[in-house]
Structures are given as structure tokens and as C-alpha cells.
Amino acid sequence: MSDNPELTPKQRLFCLEYVKDFNGKQAAIRAGYSPNSATSTASEILTYPYVIEEIGKLTKKIEQKIEVSAERILQELVKMGFSDIHNYIDNDWKLKNLEDIGENHTPAIKEVSVEEITMQYGEATKTTKNVKFKLHDKLNALEKIAKHINFYQGDDKPKETIIKIVRDKPVKKDDDKC
């Protein structure tokens, strides 16, 4: 139960419902507010400092319970963003065993499908398996990483990195600028 005396039981229920999906309208409806005014009710409730504080506490409890942190999320994004095809297939273009792929690379796998194909050759039959896999969107993961490390300026353009080249000759004062 909440230790916040300012919360009404309905507001407490709203907070509990809100942290499920962060959908204010649906949380208001599930908490017993009128569906006709759920959007405006949720907007109003979400302006109360004690409600925001309670949602923050509940979110933190959930994060601790499932061990989610910004660092862990970033680690998973790095696995997706820096995945390499060589981690999944060998030099003969055959898919590696899951054990050979390892725990550091399996999070980048989005989907695996196995199709069994049976072919008839006269009286003989041959069954083969086609295994297809898809990796998570690498570019999307890299963009999220770039935003997290503030790689982009406000206009989503990469920051310019200035590299100073040391020459064999002494640098003049005017040449000191890149």
C-alpha cells in the first residue's frame, strides 16, 4: 500500500494501472473513471506532484524487481547494433549451432524459422531443413545508442569530431586551426 496520504484510493489505483502500459486514458478507465472523460481525467491526475511521485516509486520498484537499468538496456542495444553475420554463420554459409553462437550474440536474433522440405527422388526421399533467421534492426539500435551517448546535436546531425594532424614541420600559428 502507498505511504502517500495525499493519494485517494482511486488515484492510487490509477498509478498502479498507469505503470502497466503508461497509457493515461486506459489507466483511468481501468481505475474506474468514466470512459467519456478518461483522457482529460488522466491529463489532470498526471499534473499532481504526489501522483507523479507515486508513479516514480512504482516504476523504480518494477525496474528493481526485473533488474532493468539504463546500463542493461544499453548493453542489449550494443549486442544488436554491433552484431555481425560472422557470429551466426560459418565460412561455408552454414548456420552455427546455438551453443556456438553464444549468449552475447543471441539477443540480436529477432526471429528463427525452420521449414522442413521433403523431396522424392524415384523411390528415395530426402528431407532437409531450411533454417532462416532475422536479426534485429541494426541501424535502429545504433541510432538509439547514438542518442544515448549524445552523438547527435539538437538537429539530429552527427557532432563534428575535430582531428588535429601533427605534421613533420612545425605548425604555424595560423595553421593551428583545423
Image (cartoon, rainbow, N blue to C red):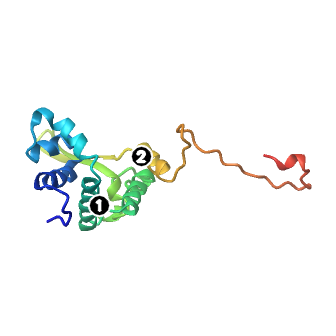
Q: How far apart are marks 2 and 1 (CA)?
A: 20 Å
Residue 2: percent from the left, percent from the top?
A: 17, 64
Badge 2 or badge 1: first in the primary sequence: 1
Residue found at the very far top of the displayed protein: 36
Q: Residue at x 24, y 58 (%)?
A: 54
Q: Position of residue 34 (x, y in %)?
A: 9, 38
Looking at the rendered structure, the secondary structure element under dot 2 is helix
- The residue positioned 56% from the left and 39% from the top of the image is 157
Residue 139 image point, x, y percent: 44, 43
Quarter location, residue 24: top left
Disc 1 is placed on an element classified as helix
Between 33 and 92, which is closer to the camera in this rendering?
33
Callout 2 crowding tier (Cα within 10 Å): few <14, some 14–19, many ≥20: some
Q: In which quarter of the image is residue 88?
A: bottom left
Does 5 appear above or below 37?
A: below
> Which residue type carries mark 1?
Leu
Residue at left 21%, top 42%?
42
Give percent across and percent down for residue 156. Answer: 52, 39
Q: Residue 83 carries which label?
A: none
Say the numbered circle drawn on residue 138.
Answer: 2
Q: Is residue 10 visible?
A: yes
User: Which image quarter is the N terminus in?
Assistant: bottom left
Q: Residues within 10 Å of mark 1 (few under 14, many from 20)?
A: few
Classify residue 52 as left or right of residue 33: right
Q: Which mark is residue 98?
A: 1
Residue 91 visible, this orientation: no
